[in-house]
Amino acid sequence: MKSPWFKEEHEIFRKTVRSFMEKELAPHWEEWEAAKDFPNWVFKRMGEMGFLGITYPEDVGGSACDYFYKVVFCEELPRSQCGGLNMAVMVQADMASPPIDILGTKEQREEYMVPIIKGEKICALGITEPNAGSDVAAMKTTAKKEGDHYVINGSKTFITNGSRADVITLAAKTDPDLGYNGISLFLLDTDLPGFSVSRKIDKMGMHPSDTAELSFEDVRVPKDKLLGEENKGFIEVMINFQGERLVAAVGAMAGAALVLEKTIKYVQEREVFGKPLSKFQVTRHKIVDMMCEIEAARQYVYYCAWLFDQDRNPAQEVSIAKIISTEMALRVMHECIQLHGGYGYTAEYGIERAYRDARLATIGGGATEVMKEVVGRTMGL
């Protein structure tokens, strides 16, 4: 459908991204799914293509593009056919690195943002803990100042890129007595003594994306690795959630659209009782219902992308977008499996894998229930 948000340059970029996903990444999805891993060359190759620095400023190697180039990238990402890889890339480009670019000193940005955008350093975001997910203020990990260092103790869990990361954008309490007002952010290099990967976590979906539990035992982090001001990290964590949730909404919508695209092709080719499935009214109506849901979500997500490009913290609108898009994706994929019949339940067509991968989007980055709480509060409820 025509859109006022995209110009010719965006569509040229879309063709480049789509070609890359389909030709360089999609051929490997079965291998990476079976291995529950993918090679690090993917990050470097994406860095070479400029995909990891789309909206970042030129002084750190980014392209300084408007946010709709990011939307295009996230819309085409599902064509890699590898949800776990997509998750890892979005963490690299849209979740772990924005605080570094925004809060980092000139030296920190040069040391970390440049290689992150090139795909030479892999980053992770260390927020979630065993007893503190969306309730960030409940985190237990501490960072105690001792001379020229902070000594960090604690653990993190459900950390995407956790076992392969070179650096972690880490949240820890520098003053536990202050609650959320005592949280700070750090750049933690994973080669420091005392850091360890406790385990890699097996998951329902997103298999090629490593999800790890991390341990910090007296990890001494130099004080120049403090990111931003001490005890001022909570607000940045909350604002950073908006970019994370928005790319999740875009990805869910685009993933649903791609699965529907595959399903339409299938029902046009699959014959039952002497005619294609698409010639049955019940099939056509299901297809139209799904298309309507996808397009409604698409247009609202585009509006939120425009808002986000103006202001990093449109919390109400982005939360609504995540609810609408991620819940819609599950409904669409459920119906697409049904239209594929027995084949939809097999691994052959990839629909069941897309459904398993999509299930995370209603949980990660703030579960649907948390998003409803955010919206409710912005309404004064």
Image (spheres, helix red, strand yellow):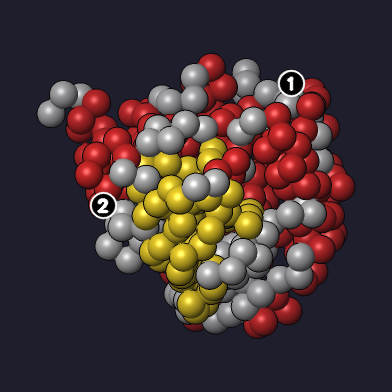
- Residue 194 shows which numbered tag? none
**Which is more toward the observer, 290 or 172?**
172
In the image, what residue occupies the spot 31% across and 58% down? 140
Question: Regarding mark 1 in the picture, which secondary structure is present there?
Answer: loop
Badge 1, how many Cα within 10 Å: few under 14, some, many 20+? few
Q: What percent of the width, then of the height, locates residue 254?
A: 57, 47
Q: Quadrant of the N terminus?
A: top right
| Any part of residue 366 in sight | no
Residue annotated with mark 2: 138
Q: Report how many numbered discs are placed on residues in the image.
A: 2
| Quarter of the image where one finds residue 231 | top left
Observer able to see residue 36: yes
* Residue shown at 49% from the left, 25% from the top: 312
Element marked by disc 2: helix
Residue 125 at x, y = what percent?
A: 52, 52
* Quadrant of residue 133 within the rendered picture: bottom left
As drawn, the residue found furthest toward the left would be 381
Query: Residue at the front extreme?
Result: 147
Question: What's the amino acid at mark 2?
Answer: Ala
Mark 2, Cα crowd under 10 Å, few <14 / some 14-19 / many 20+, is some
Q: Give the CA distance from mark 2 to mark 1.
A: 44 Å
Closest to the observer, 193 or 302: 193
Q: Where residue 327 sits: x, y (%)?
A: 37, 50
Relative to 182, residue 159 above or below: below
Q: Which residue is mark 1?
A: 7
Q: Position of residue 330 (x, y in %)?
A: 41, 57
In this orientation, which residue lies closer to the viewer: 62 or 288?
A: 62
Report whether 270 appears left or right of 320. right
Q: Say what amino acid the circle numbered 1 marks.
A: Lys
